[in-house]
Image (cartoon, helix red, strand yellow):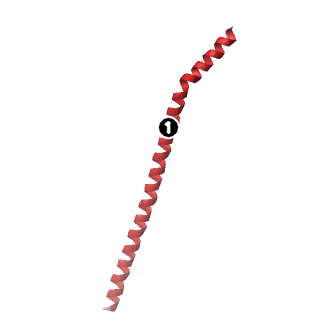
Amino acid sequence: MNADDDGLSGQARRNREAEEHRAAQDAIQTRRDEAAELGTLRGKMEFARCLGAAPSLMAAFQRLKDQARA
């Protein structure tokens, strides 16, 4: 009976360890996914910022172009 108990308790321990390992792997993957989403969002925000600056840059280039012609 003791051998069976050791076998069952050992299996239960291994199952708990496997579940903890899966939970840790899931947490790591979640952090990676969040980091990827954050990187994408930062890229979109930077692109939007550049687009916002585009009209003033175009105006400055036009002024330089006009000055060069004058």
Q: Nearer the viewer, residue 53 or 5?
A: 53
For the image shown, how many numbered marks are present on the structure?
1
User: Most extreme residue toward the left, as rendered?
Assistant: 1
| Quarter of the image where the C terminus is located | top right
Residue at 39% across, 76% down: 14
Return the x and y of residue 30 as percentages of the image width and height: 43, 55
* Three-letter code for the amino acid on which mark 1 is drawn: Met
Disc 1 element: helix
Q: Nearer the viewer, residue 19 or 27?
A: 27
Using the image, determine if residue 65 lies above or below residue 46.
Answer: above
Using the image, determine if residue 21 lies above or below residue 69.
Answer: below
Label 1 environment density (alpha carbons within 10 Å; few <14, some 14–19, many ≥20) = few
Residue at 54% across, 31% down: 50
46 relative to 26 in the view: left or right: right
Residue at 45% across, 51% down: 34
| Quarter of the image where the N terminus is located | bottom left
Using the image, determine if residue 67 lies above or below residue 6.
Answer: above
Return the x and y of residue 16 as percentages of the image width and height: 38, 74
User: Most extreme residue toward the bottom, as rendered?
Assistant: 1
Disc 1: which residue: 45
Q: Quadrant of residue 25?
A: bottom left
Residue at 65% across, 14% down: 65
Return the x and y of residue 49 as percentages of the image width and height: 52, 33
51 relative to 60 in the view: left or right: left
Return the x and y of residue 4 as percentages of the image width and height: 32, 87
